Amino acid sequence: MLVEIPDLDVIFGLILAFIGGLFTLFVYSKLKSISASNEQTKQDSERLEFYERQLIDLKIKLDAIDLENLSFSQETPQNIVKNEEKPVQVVEKQVQVVPEQVPVPARVERTPNMSSGDIVEAVLRLITDRSRTSRDIQITLGKSREHISRTMKKMSDDGLVQRNTNAKPYSYSITQNGLSRLSGSGGTPQTIAPQTS
């Protein structure tokens, strides 16, 4: 079997290309490590500056405290009169034990069951003087949140009240239709006391 040996120029070219590749790889790795160390150095310097600022702030605070202590010690008089203990007479007094009277809370009556027309009129009377939120109406009438929400939605759909959606919680004010219904009912206005339970 015959093996043909290539020219010496080809062998030297391959060896030089291999050595050139190794040299390029070496230079690339060195440059990469230098740039990585520059980034790390930048992070370290930023961290160092942060801690320096913190130390400066603490030193300023300590100096201020020292100045306060120094000025306080200068303000205290040097001739302090020592308190002399004087004999104290002990006086015994008779103490009467008075039993506490427990106050009985006044009973709060709830509004009687109202029909839907009565609720609508009561709500209209509430919001004639100023707009109110559904929570205000709920507390005043002593009804559930769902009941008041449904009633207010129905009244809004009927055009009796106007919902102000510019701010939360929504507030309700009476419309002209509501005023005419209230005056058309002929009922005397009642004041409804807030209900607490």
Image (cartoon, helix red, strand yellow):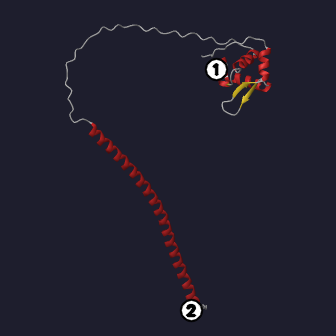
**Vertical position of residue 101 compared to residue 85: above or below:** above
At x 49%, y 63%, the residue is 39
**Vertical position of residue 172 compared to residue 37: above or below:** above
Q: Residue 78 occupies which quadrant of the picture? A: top left
Near-viewer residue (118 or 60): 60
Near-viewer residue (101 or 127): 127
Q: Which of the two labelled residues, at mark 2 and mark 1, occupies the earlier sequence position?
A: 2
Q: Secondary structure at mark 1?
A: helix
Left or right: where 141 falls relative to 87:
right
Q: Position of residue 43 (x, y in %)?
A: 47, 60
Left or right: where 73 falls relative to 61:
left
User: Which label number is shown at residue 8?
Assistant: 2
Instruction: Kindly indicate whether the residue at mark 1 contacts the one at mark 2 (C-beta within 8 angstroms).
Output: no
For the C terminus, the image quarter is top right
Q: How many C-alpha atoms fall within 10 Å of the one at disc 1: few (<14), some, or many (≥20)?
A: some
Kindly identify which residue carries mark 1.
Answer: 139
Report, in whole angstroms, how far the alpha carbon at label 2 lies from the one at label 1: 105 Å
**Residue 142 in view here:** no
At x 65%, y 18%, the residue is 140
Q: Position of residue 77 (x, y in %)?
A: 24, 35
For the N terminus, the image quarter is bottom right
Near-viewer residue (60 or 93): 60
Q: Position of residue 99 (x, y in %)?
A: 41, 7
Q: Position of residue 36 (x, y in %)?
A: 50, 66
Question: Of the residues tagged 2 and 1, which is closer to the observer?
Answer: 1
Q: Amino acid at mark 1?
A: Ile
Q: How many C-alpha atoms fall within 10 Å of the one at disc 2: few (<14), some, or many (≥20)?
A: few
**Vertical position of residue 43 compared to residue 66: above or below:** below
User: Which label number is shown at residue 30?
Assistant: none
**Residue 49 in view here:** yes
At x 51%, y 75%, the residue is 27
Q: Amino acid at mark 2?
A: Leu
